[in-house]
Amino acid sequence: MPEATACLHPDFRALVKVARLEDAIAGRVEGTGYLAEVSVTCAACGIAFRFVGVPAGIDYARPTTAIDGCTLHAPIEPATSPTLASRATYRVPGAIRPH
């Protein structure tokens, strides 16, 4: 990982990998779910960015991060699945503080 610098992080790179989850134990070959893995780095200095406020681990029902916080594991589904709004909750955050 690059050392900390005085970089103002003017531009970013994002990498997204998508995986189809299959139930190998039950022998099901059709997809049982989908997972997007997202990581973000500064394009200028290469520093990785962490996803804040997301627990570490793997959960196929809600977003989590890798143990270092630098990769977001986000369960996804086709837009033809039942709408997310029926099971969504909303929270308005307080003031944003720069890090």
Image (cartoon, grey):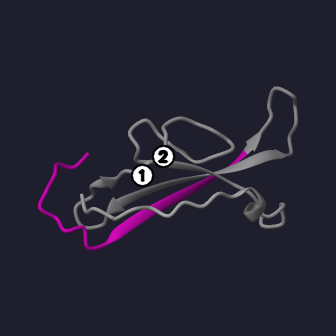
In magenta segment, residue 59: no
Position of residue 11 measured from the top left corner of the image (x, y, whole percent): 31, 72
Work out which residue is located at the far bottom of the displayed protein and give it. Answer: 10
Amino acid identity at mark 1:
Phe
Q: Position of residue 36 (x, y in %)?
A: 60, 53
Quarter-of-image position of residue 29: top right
Q: What residue appears at the point 42 percent right and 51 percent down from the top-left corner?
A: 51
Range of magenta residues: 1-20
- The correct choice, above or below, for 65 with respect to 41 in the image is above
Estimate how packed mark 1 is, as few (under 14), some (14 to 19) or many (20 or more) residues with alpha carbons within 10 Å: some
Label 1–label 2 contact, CB within 8 A: yes
Q: Position of residue 24 (x, y in %)?
A: 80, 31
For this rendering, which residue is in front, 41 or 67?
A: 67
Residue at left 44%, top 63%?
14
Q: Looking at the picture, which amino acid does disc 2 mark? A: Val
Alpha carbons under labels 1 and 2: distance apart: 7 Å
Callout 2 crowding tier (Cα within 10 Å): few <14, some 14–19, many ≥20 = some
Quick one: SS at disc 2? loop
Disc on res. 51 = 1
Residue 73 in the image, given as x and y percentages of width and height: 56, 47
Residue marked by disc 2: 54
Q: Quadrant of the N terminus?
A: top left
